[in-house]
């Protein structure tokens, strides 16, 4: 996971437990024009939340560049 975040250029990441019991994994990616883009994955399991977020991040990086 950390290797993939590094490949994507992630500035930061976090994992939170929501009041619903689900997990939210978030990462911040740098925008080409400045600033950052927050991407989230939410799931009942930690691993799935991470996977969903990394999938979104991969698609976002591909579209942004």
Image (cartoon, grey):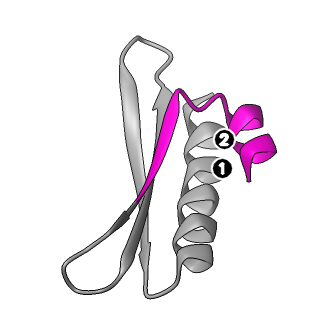
Q: As drawn, is 19 to the left or to the right of 37?
A: left
Magenta highlight range: 1-15
Q: Residue at x 63, y 68 (%)?
A: 51
Q: Position of residue 59 (x, y in %)?
A: 61, 52
Q: Position of residue 49 (x, y in %)?
A: 51, 72
The answer to which of 32 and 10 lies nearer the viewer is 10
The answer to which of 47 and 28 lies nearer the viewer is 47
Q: Residue at x 41, y 58 (%)?
A: 40
Callout 2: helix, strand or loop? helix
Q: As drawn, is 9 to the left or to the right of 42?
A: right
From the image, tell me which residue sits under label 1.
Answer: 58
Q: Residue at x 50, y 16 (%)?
A: 32
Image quarter in which the C terminus is found: top right
Q: Residue at x 62, y 75 (%)?
A: 47
13 is higher (above) or lower (below) than 1: above
State which mark lies toward you, 2 or 1.
Answer: 1
Image quarter in which the N terminus is found: bottom right
43 is higher (above) or lower (below) than 1: below
13 is higher (above) or lower (below) than 51: above
Q: In the image, which disc is placed on residue 62? A: 2
Examine the structure image and report whether residue 8 is included in the region drawn in magenta. yes
- Mark 2 vs 1: CB contact within 8 A: yes
């Amino acid at each position: 996971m950390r290797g993939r975040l590094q490949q994507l250029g992630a500035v930061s990441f976090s994992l939170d437990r929501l009041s619903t019991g689900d997990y939210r994994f978030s990462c911040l990616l740098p925008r080409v024009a400045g600033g950052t883009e927050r991407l989230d994955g939410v799931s009942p399991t930690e691993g799935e939340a991470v996977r969903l977020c990394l999938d979104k991040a991969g698609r976002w990086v591909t579209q942004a560049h």
